Image (cartoon, rainbow, N blue to C red):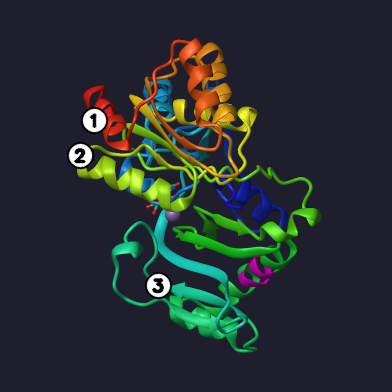
C-alpha cells in the first residue's frame, strides 16, 4: 500500500525526521493560515505533482481560498485529491534524493542517493548511487554522494532506517530531501510503500481493499472481467480514437453488490462520459451483473450512459432482467465502443 504524503510524513515525524509544519484539509473545511507564504500540495497517491500543478505556492491570504479550491478540482493523472496538505514554506538551499528500498534480486535493503533531487530526477539520466544498508561505511558513502558532512546525514539516516524497519516499508523515498538555508535537512516530500503482508502489525494504517481500479485520465470507463478482456476493450477504445478512463479487471465471480461499487467508483472519476461493460461470464454470472446494473441505475447519482455487452453464463436471464428494466444491451464490443465515442 502506498501512503499519502501527509500520512507518510506523520510516520517520519514519529521517527524524529524533520518535516515541514503542515495541516491537512478536506473539501469544505474552512481554514486560514496565519503566516504566508504557504505551499498547497494535492494529496494523490502519485508522484510528479509539481510539474502537473498539484503543488502551489500561495503568497498571501487573498489568494488562499481560490488556489485551494483550484487544487481540489485539479485531477492529477486521473486522481482527484480527497485532501490537500497546507505547509509552511522552507528556504531551499539544495534538493537531494534519498531513499531506502528492498532490492529483491539482491535480497537486501539499499540506500539510493543522488545529489540532484527534486522534480528533475525522473528525467535525469544520471544513475542514482546504490549503497547497501548492511555496509558499515554507509553513512560516509551517502554523505560523499550528496557532498555533505557525514555528521549532518548520520542522525537522519539512523532515523530513516528506524522508520523503514518499524513500518515494514518496501520503499521509503524522500524527494526532495531539502538542505535549508539554515543548514538543516528536511523531508519536503515523502513516499512510503508499506508491505501489504505486514498489515496485521499495523492496525492504525488506512488499509483499503485493493479494488484493482486504475484511473487513466480518459473519458470512457471500462469494466471487464479478466485482464485480457480489459486490455482488449481498452485497445478497441484507443483504436476508435477514444481514451479509457480506467483499467479494471473485476476477475471471476463478482456479485451484484461488488459490481455496483465498481460502477460507483468509475462514475466518481473525473470526466467520465460513458462506461463500457464487457463481460464474458464463466464463473461470473451475467444475471448478477445485470442486477448490479439495475441497482446502479436507481442508486448512483450522475451515472453516465452504460454500453453493455454480456456473454456466457446466464446471459438469457440477464437479457430478460435488463429488458424488463428498459436497459438496452449491445450485441458486440464494437457497437459499445461506437456508441461510447458518440457520447464523448
Ligand atoms: P512531487 O512533484 O509530486 O514529487 O511533489 P514535491 O513535494 O516533491 O514538490 C515538488 C517541488 O516543489 C519540490 O521539488 C520543490 O522544488 C518544490 N517545493 C515543495 N515544497 C516546497 C517548499 O516548502 N518550499 C519551496 N520553495 N519549494 C517547495
Ligand atoms: Mn517529490
Measured in 3D between alpha carbons, the distance from the residue under mark 2 to the one under mark 1, in whole angstroms, is 8 Å
Nearer to me, 332 or 187: 332
Element carrying mark 2: loop
The answer to whether the residues at label 2 and label 1 have Cβ atoms under 8 Å apart is yes
For ligand 2, the image quadrant comes to: bottom left
| Predominant SS of the magenta segment | helix
Q: Residue at x 32, y 43 (%)?
A: 52
Instruction: State the extent of the magenta-drawn residues as a range.
Output: 157-161
The part of the image, by quadrant, that contains residue 120 is: bottom left
Kind of element beneath mark 1: helix
Residue 143 image point, x, y percent = 51, 79
Label 3, label 1: how many angstroms apart (C-alpha)? Answer: 51 Å
Q: What residue sits 56% from the left and 78% below the top?
A: 110
Mark 2 or mark 3, whichever is nearer to me: 2
Task: Give the labeled residue for mark 3.
Answer: 115
Residue 191 or residue 21, whichever sits in front: 191
- Answer yes or no: is residue 337 visible: yes
- In the rendered image, the vertical position of residue 49 relative to residue 16, given as above or below: above
In the depicted view, which residue is nearer to us: 33 or 232? 232
Mark with earlier residue (2, 3): 3
Residue 76 part of the magenta segment: no
Mark 1 is surrounded, within 10 Å at the Cα level, by few (under 14), some (14 to 19) or many (20 or more) other residues, namely: some
Dot 2 or dot 1, earlier in sequence: 2
- Name the residue beneath numbered marker 2: 240
Spatial separation of the CA atoms under disc 2 and disc 3 = 45 Å
Which residue, given by chain and number where applicable, does mark 1 sit on? 338
In the image, residue 55 lies at what x, y percent? 39, 41
Amino acid at each position: 500500500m502506498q501512503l499519502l504524503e501527509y500520512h507518510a510524513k506523520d510516520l517520519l515525524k514519529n521517527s524524529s525526521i524533520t518535516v515541514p509544519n503542515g495541516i491537512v484539509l478536506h473539501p469544505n473545511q474552512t481554514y486560514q493560515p496565519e503566516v504566508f507564504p504557504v505551499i498547497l500540495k494535492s494529496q494523490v497517491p502519485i508522484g510528479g505533482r509539481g510539474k502537473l500543478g498539484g503543488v502551489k505556492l500561495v503568497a498571501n491570504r487573498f489568494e488562499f481560498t481560490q488556489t485551494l479550491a483550484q487544487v481540489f478540482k485539479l485531477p492529477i493523472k486521473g486522481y482527484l485529491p480527497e485532501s490537500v496538505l497546507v505547509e509552511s514554506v522552507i528556504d531551499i538551499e539544495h534538493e537531494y534524493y534519498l531513499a531506502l528500498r528492498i532490492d529483491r534480486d539482491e535480497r537486501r535493503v539499499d540506500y539510493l542517493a543522488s545529489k540532484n533531487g527534486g522534480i528533475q530526477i525522473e528525467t535525469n539520466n544520471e544513475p542514482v548511487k546504490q549503497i547497501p544498508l548492511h555496509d558499515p561505511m554507509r553513512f560516509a558513502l551517502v554523505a560523499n554522494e550528496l557532498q555533505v558532512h557525514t555528521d549532518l546525514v548520520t542522525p537522519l539516516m539512523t532515523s530513516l532506517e528506524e522508520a523503514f524497519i518499524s513500518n515494514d516499508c518496501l520503499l521509503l523515498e524522500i524527494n526532495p530531501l531539502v538542505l535549508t538555508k539554515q543548514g538543516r535537512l528536511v523531508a519536503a516530500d515523502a513516499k512510503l510503500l508499506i508491505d501489504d503482508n505486514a498489515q496485521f502489525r499495523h492496525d492504525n494504517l488506512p488499509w483499503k481493499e485493493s479494488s484493482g481500479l486504475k484511473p487513466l485520465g480518459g473519458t470512457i470507463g471500462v469494466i471487464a472481467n479478466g485482464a485480457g478482456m480489459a486490455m482488449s476493450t481498452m485497445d478497441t477504445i484507443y483504436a476508435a480514437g477514444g481514451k479509457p478512463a480506467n483499467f479494471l479487471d473485476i476477475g471471476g465471480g463478482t456479485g451484484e453488490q461488488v459490481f455496483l461499487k465498481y460502477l460507483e467508483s468509475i462514475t466518481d472519476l473525473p470526466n467520465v462520459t460513458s462506461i463500457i461493460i464487457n463481460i464474458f461470464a464463466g464463473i461470473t454470472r451475467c444475471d448478477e451483473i445485470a442486477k448490479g446494473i439495475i441497482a446502479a441505475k436507481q442508486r448512483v447519482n450522475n451515472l453516465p450512459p452504460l454500453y453493455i455487452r454480456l456473454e456466457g453464463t446466464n446471459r438469457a436471464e440477464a437479457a430478460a432482467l435488463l429488458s424488463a428494466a428498459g436497459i438496452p444491451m449491445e450485441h458486440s464490443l464494437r457497437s459499445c465502443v461506437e456508441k461510447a465515442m458518440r457520447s464523448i
